[in-house]
Image (tube, rainbow, N blue to C red):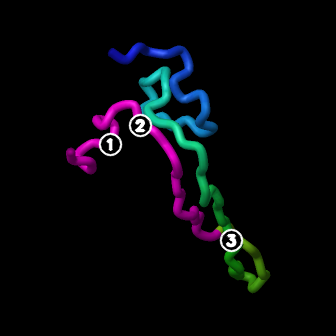
Amino acid sequence: MALPRERPYSQFNFHVFFSTANQHPDAAFQEITGLHQNLPDAPTTDQSDNPRKITGTYKVGDVTLKRGVIGELSVLGNGCSR
């Protein structure tokens, strides 16, 4: 029988919470890549033809989670079948 440990994901650097109601992480991963964002400026002109820059569309990259463990399959929803 598995016993609950105080720090079950001790060798994993990145803890993931899928719900804000949890006090303990639902999963943990050793490596995460793709954590970047881009917020470009979009040039525009106002009514008096003065050039201005406004904030463009907020873009984020694809996040890849590597070498991880998940405490329960139920946190994945219907996307995981046995």
Magenta includes 72? Answer: yes
Rounded to the nearest angstrom, the CA distance separating label 3 from label 1 is: 33 Å
Identify the mark at residue 40; answer none if there is no mark: 3
Residue with the mark numbered 2: 70
From the viewer's perspective, is the residue at label 3 or at label 1 nearer? 1
- Contact between marks 2 and 1 (CB within 8 A): the answer is yes
Give the answer, above or below, for where 6 lies relative to 19: above
Which secondary structure lies at badge 3? loop
Identify the mark at residue 76; answer none if there is no mark: 1
- Contact between marks 3 and 1 (CB within 8 A): the answer is no
Residue at image coords 46%, 36%: 27
For badge 3, the amino acid type reads Pro
User: Which span of residues is magenta-colored?
Assistant: 56-82
- Image quadrant in which you'd find residue 61: bottom right
* Residue 21 image point, x, y percent: 42, 24
* Residue 71 image point, x, y percent: 39, 31
